Image (cartoon, rainbow, N blue to C red):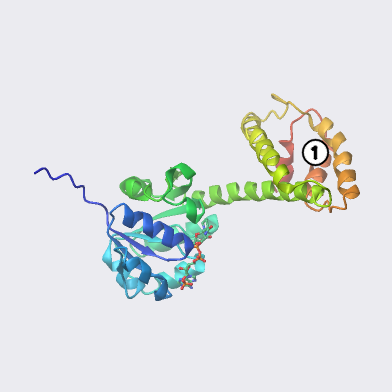
Amino acid sequence: MTQNTVEKTSVTLLGLGAMGTALARTWLAAGHPLTVWNRTPGRAMPLAAEGANIAGSAAEAVAANTLVVVCLLDDASVEDALAGTDLADRDLVNLTTGTPAQARARATWARERGARYLDGGIMAVPPMIGVQEAGGYVFYSGSRELFERHRETLAVPAGTVYVGQDAGFAALHDVALLSAMYGMFAGAAHAFALIRKEDIDPTSLAPLLADWLVAMAPAVHRTAAQLRSGDYTRGVVSSLAMQVAGTPAFLSTAEQQGVSTELLSPYFELMRRRLDGGGGEEDLTGVIDLLVR
Ligand code: FVH
């Protein structure tokens, strides 16, 4: 008989909210021995039936395995949960959303307690976890050695993208992408508001909107190339001057439709300022310089 089993890394997971539970299930399904802890114990119980070891305390959970993943509400809850645990010689992977400064401080904090540290920013919602084709992934930053050591285990719930030794970079990438997402949602909200009082079915606008946003998204590559070269006129398709000239039509349409321009106007004001500063031949890239203080 041939023995073809590869030993899977044992994982400790602190935090069984919506995201933590999704992570737990994928590791269990992939055959990783898993020890879990949650502040409210009732949330851990269903996982026992799926094979998880339920720790009675965070300290017990941390003691159980070298690889300790935390996925909690915020940085303060990480502080709370890990208080009183012995992190010496642990590989701490923190998937809790926070700021770059919090991640850097947490890396120092972990090092002072004898742990190796990796920070993560999750680019997925719980239903995407463990579903490869959903395209979710996690940004990681901090110890490269730690990332390489646990790469395979970390890749079980979602893809992995390592963005550098600076522990704050995962959070920075996370916040950058999510900020762009909110800009997109803001634009979509304005678009739906424009048709709200008309005899137009929002479900007929939605696919048009989605396709349009997808068609426009690659423009970020031109923006990046212009930022890198410092030449904001390179490869311009629609000049800033032309675009500013078009803005009254957007503002008037909003007014005629009884829609507030509070989402749109701040961006238009930045475009106008850049135009007034002599950027008429440029792309929209100059707006970025106005944002950076
Ligand atoms: N869910 C999502 O869509 C997003 C997707 C992108 C990444 N985020 C971040 O993931 C972290 C966890 O999110 P979550 O969805 O699991 O959040 P909740 O379901 O609200 O669960 C929160 C867990 O945190 C525990 N907790 C809260 N405060 C404390 C504390 N002081 N001490 C110990 N644990 C604490 C909470 O425990 P309990 O309320 O069940 O006792 C949950 O386990 C988060 O950073 C998202 O931004 C998710």
Residue 168 at x, y percent in the picture: 50, 52
Q: In this view, does 243 lie above or below 175?
A: above
How many numbered marks have been drawn onto this rendered protein structure?
Answer: 1
- Image quadrant holding the N terminus, namely top left
| Residue 91 appearing in the image | yes
Give left or right: position of 279 versus 166: right
Give left or right: position of 43 versus 148: right
| Image quarter of residue 94 | bottom left
Residue 100 at x, y percent in the picture: 53, 55
Q: What residue type is labelled 1?
A: Arg
Furthest residue toward left: 1
What secondary structure is marked by label 1?
helix
User: 149 or 201: which is nearer to us?
Assistant: 201
Q: How crowded is mark 1: few (under 14 residues within 10 Å), some or many (20 or more)?
A: many
Residue 116 at x, y percent in the picture: 35, 56
Give left or right: position of 248 versus 71: right
User: 25 or 59: which is nearer to us?
Assistant: 25
Q: Is residue 193 above or below residue 88?
A: above
Q: Which residue corresponds to the image point at 37% horizontal and 63% vertical from the top-left? A: 13
Q: Which residue corresponds to the image point at 72% horizontal and 43% vertical from the top-left? A: 204
Q: In this view, does 244 lie above or below 30?
A: above
Give left or right: position of 229 versus 16: right
Residue 199 at x, y percent in the picture: 82, 47
What residue is shown with label 1? 274
Q: Which residue corresponds to the image point at 33% horizontal and 46% vertical from the top-left? A: 152
| Residue 93 appearing in the image | no
